[in-house]
Image (cartoon, grey):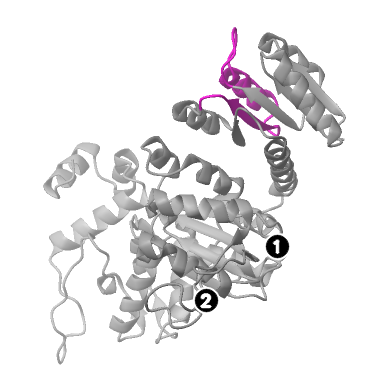
């Protein structure tokens, strides 16, 4: 049975909320007017959901939230606020709050929020139960994730979480740096969902003009405006029964964000020029390479839209944080290239693993595919790798009797020192030890290479 805790210093408000919840069938509702009594309740009882007023005397809601998350992190906390203070709401989310509601509350708004919180809690609890075996076990829907190559523990857990969210209908937000594979994960979520038989429609939100948003998304009927000579399907209709992938959602104008929020909340839309609303029968997956929380603080992203997307948030780690995947990915890219029989030398593999990959998987793919074209002898060597910003040695043109590369001893030494230095995450002490030289010698050489 669901247990709900409500903390607010207004007794009339507590009575009202308790009455609404009881009428909806929630029997275990505990109300507290004095926030100082919450600590004792947490020791004696377990709760599924907690409603916490942010502004209270003696102890504010943020302090109670921090205490609850420290003792029982699985409790879904919903913050209550009368003034919608952005800094307070942002701080609450950082502390682990699930959502927030602005007073005065509408009964339907309160009940929907609690329903979503319980659904999210169920997914989180399931994920925790599976997390211990997530790396060793196989994904339930392996074909959906077959395109994602990894042996990284964090990536594997992320894919398990993605599979769990795919089974629900809530919108999914995929974040991560440019090139980490956000659309690839979005397609996996689509293929693992009940919408897999439907279309996957990808839209780059940067290409959508604010003045054309409704026509592009909702579609229009004949005669809706000058030049509308026939009916036109919008993206929502094109993705019917499937998934609509909204890429670069962090770059939307505030006006478009408001229109998108209404679609997510109401689940309906009306084509331009029509009077008949249509049901949005599709799954939303959004992606961004920006920190949406910082955009909210800067008033460039709507906080109400952010909280509609944070229910299922998947953050893909950058490639530099999962270096064990680099060789696996390189092998996959070689296999899918125009030269699948090319081999990657150990020296070249070491160079790849030492690079920081600011462009992530997309950059690695381009470097490996280009190296396959240059590896005329069938083996990719360090000189075939063309990483942006990386130090490389230009080879002289080959000719009769000139099969060996010609480098100065100094350039070979520099390349080797920098390769070891990068591979050891720029730890100078360990680098000097591996190279068998003194620390002062290493400092001197790095300084000569322009590294301080």
Horizontal arrangement in the rendering, residue 13 relative to residue 213 (left or right): right
Q: Position of residue 443 (x, y in %)?
A: 19, 40
Asked which quadrant contains residue 139, the reply is bottom right
Residue wearing tag 1: 138
User: Is residue 294 at least partly visible in the picture?
Assistant: yes
Q: CA distance from mark 2 to mark 1?
A: 40 Å
Indicate whether residue 240 is drawn in magenta. no
User: Is residue 174 at least partly visible in the picture?
Assistant: no
Residue wearing tag 2: 233
- Identity of the residue drawn at 31% across and 83% down: 373
Magenta stretch: give its range: 54-83
Asked whether 1 or 209 is in front, the reply is 209
- Identity of the residue drawn at 55% across and 62% down: 150
For disc 2, the neighbor class at 10 Å (few under 14, some 14 to 19, many from 20) is some
SS label for mark 2 = loop
**Residue that protrudes farthest toward the top in the picture:** 58
Q: Is residue 98 above or below residue 8?
A: below
């Amino acid at each position: 049975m669901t247990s709900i805790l409500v903390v607010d210093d207004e007794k009339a408000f507590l009575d009202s909320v308790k009455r609404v919840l009881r009428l909806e069938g929630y029997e275990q509702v505990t109300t507290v007017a004095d926030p100082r009594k919450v600590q004792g309740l947490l020791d004696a009882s377990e709760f599924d959901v907690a409603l916490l007023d942010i502004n209270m005397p003696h102890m504010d809601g943020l302090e109670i939230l921090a205490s609850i998350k420290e003792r029982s992190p699985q409790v879904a906390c919903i913050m209550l606020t009368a003034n919608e203070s952005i800094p307070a709401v942002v701080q609450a989310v950082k502390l682990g709050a699930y959502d927030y509601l602005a007073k005065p509350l509408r009964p339907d708004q309160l009940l929907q929020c609690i329903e979503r919180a319980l659904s999210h809690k169920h997914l989180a609890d399931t994920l925790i139960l599976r997390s211990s075996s997530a790396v060793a076990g196989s994904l339930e829907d392996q074909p959906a994730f077959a395109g994602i190559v990894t042996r990284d523990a964090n990536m594997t857990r992320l894919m398990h979480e993605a599979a769990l969210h795919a089974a629900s209908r809530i919108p999914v937000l995929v974040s991560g740096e440019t090139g980490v594979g956000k659309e690839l994960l979005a397609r996996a979520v689509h293929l693992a969902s009940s919408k897999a038989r439907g279309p996957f429609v990808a839209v780059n939100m940067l290409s959508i003009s604010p003045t054309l948003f409704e026509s592009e998304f909702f579609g229009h009927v004949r005669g809706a405006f000058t030049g509308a000579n026939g009916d036109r399907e919008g993206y929502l209709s094109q993705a019917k029964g499937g998934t609509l992938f909204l890429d670069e959602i962090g770059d939307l104008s505030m006006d478009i964000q408001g229109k998108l929020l209404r679609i997510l909340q109401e689940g309906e839309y009306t084509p331009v020029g029509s009077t008949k609303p249509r049901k949005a029968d599709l799954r939303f997956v959004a992606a961004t390479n920006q920190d949406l929380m910082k955009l909210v603080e800067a008033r460039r992203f709507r906080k109400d839209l952010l909280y509609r997307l944070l229910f299922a948030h998947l953050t893909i780690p950058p490639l530099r944080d999962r270096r064990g995947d680099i060789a696996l990915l390189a092998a996959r890219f070689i296999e899918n290239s125009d030269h699948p029989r090319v081999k990657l030398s150990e020296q070249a593999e070491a160079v790849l693993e030492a690079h920081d990959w600011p462009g992530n998987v997309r950059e690695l793919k381009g470097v490996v595919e280009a190296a396959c074209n240059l590896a005329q002898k069938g083996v990719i060597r360090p000189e075939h790798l063309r990483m942006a910003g990386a130090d490389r040695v230009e080879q002289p043109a080959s000719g009769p009797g000139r099969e060996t590369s010609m480098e100065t001893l100094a350039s070979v030494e520099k390349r080797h020192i920098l390769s070891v230095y990068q591979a050891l995450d720029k730890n100078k002490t360990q680098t000097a030890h591996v190279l068998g030289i003194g620390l002062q010698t290493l400092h001197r050489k790095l300084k000569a290479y322009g590294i301080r």
